[in-house]
Amino acid sequence: MRVLVLHTQIPFVTGGAEVLAHGLVGALVERGHEAEIVALPLQWNPPERLLDTALAWRMLDLTSVNGRAVDAVICTKFPTWAVRHPNKVLWLVHQHRQAYDLHGTTHTEFGPQHGEIRDAVFRIDGVGIGECKRQFAISKNVASRLAEFNGLDAAALYPPVQDRDLYAEAYEPFVLSASRIDPLKRIGAVVDAWPQVDKSLTLKITSDGPERGVLEARVRELGIEQRVEFLGRVSDAALADLMRRCRAVFFAPIDEDYGYVAVEALAAGKPVVTAPDSGGVLEFVEHEVSGQVTALTPAALAQAINRYVDAGIAQRHGETGQRSTRGLTWDNVVEALLGPAGEVGR
């Protein structure tokens, strides 16, 4: 089949959605299909720009390209499903969350004056997603939002982890944070807890983001510079190396869609420290089984992390979590999206 994976790109930002799109294309090609990514940038500030982006997708007719038929398109993020094609498939990474579950919080651009635009986003999703022949979401959490807000059903279809060498090489005395340094990821919580964490453990923070400067200042204020290290952006190989060697991984975002970081940590045999409101992460991490699910107050979070002063507990939890990721395969994903022998394109 000839398949296009439709992706909304935020320029200069790379995250789990980009990993998913490129991984899906690679999986399709490996299984004998022709596949490419089609991406358009998303503008949301001011909110009126969202409708411009949706219109741009609606104006695209991807039924054929360069005189050759496209058998199917796979839609991933708002508003890719506005595209015109008779064989649209949904693999929902997330909707425009600022119009949905984040509405009314400090994490949205929508104000009281933007009610009509928010209503338009709901209509775009209702029509576009409703046109999709198959409807999947990357987690039960994402599927539940779609059902709650739009009355549409999607089955959970979990993405596999990246194809890199993940296993438990050691349980060295450091905790790893490997997500973007952004308020939604709540890395500040682990920084605030660190003075109460056992001094045998250090914290390594990779990546970058708008909160990095604030958190670096907070580390200096708390006097824990010798125990907290900001590594910045690291290569995939370097991140895999850190995953293989760390004692545990901290990943406690607000209502995460899926949580690549957590799933990769579990694949590497490492326990994950997360929170009760971290969303899709909780579909894999179970308290005192494959990690710690804890409130993010400094005392509670430090107590949870201190469970892993004992490397034996970390190893036991990590090995349990590792087993939970073994069924995540691209074979399952491709067959679900396209059907046996590519029946969705017929």
Image (cartoon, grey):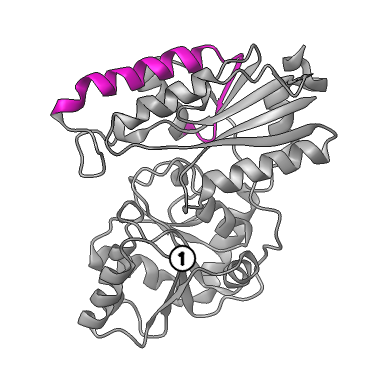
Q: Residue at x 68, y 29 (%)?
A: 4
Q: Position of residue 152 (x, y in %)?
A: 45, 16
What amino acid does circle 1 point to? Ser
Which residue extends farthest right?
Answer: 32
Q: Residue at x 15, y 26 (%)?
A: 113
Q: State the SS at label 1.
A: loop
Q: Residue at x 35, y 22 (%)?
A: 121
Q: Residues within 10 Å of mark 1 (few under 14, many from 20)?
A: some
Is 160 colored magenta in this rendering?
no
Residue labelled with disc 1: 207
The image quadrant that residue 91 belongs to is top right
Q: Position of residue 78 (x, y in %)?
A: 45, 30
Q: Is residue 181 left or right of residue 192?
A: right
Magenta stretch secondary structure, dominant: helix
Q: Nearer the viewer, residue 228 or 169?
A: 228
In the rendered image of this protein, does residue 115 appear above or below residue 171?
A: above
In the rendered image of this protein, does residue 103 appear above or below residue 234?
A: above
Q: In which quadrant is the C terminus drawn?
A: top right
Q: Is residue 171 left or right of residue 202?
A: right
Is residue 328 visible to us here? no
Q: Nearer the viewer, residue 54 or 292?
A: 54
Which residue extends farthest front?
Answer: 66
Is 139 colored magenta in this rendering?
yes
Q: Is residue 177 left or right of residue 192?
A: right
In the rendered image of this protein, does residue 287 appear above or below residue 224?
A: above
Q: Residue at x 28, y 18 (%)?
A: 119
Q: Which residues are magenta?
A: 113-140
Q: Position of residue 103 (x, y in %)?
A: 24, 33
Q: Position of residue 252 (x, y in %)?
A: 38, 55
Q: Nearer the viewer, residue 160 or 342?
A: 342
Which residue extends farthest bottom?
Answer: 226
Q: Is residue 41 left or right of residue 228?
A: right
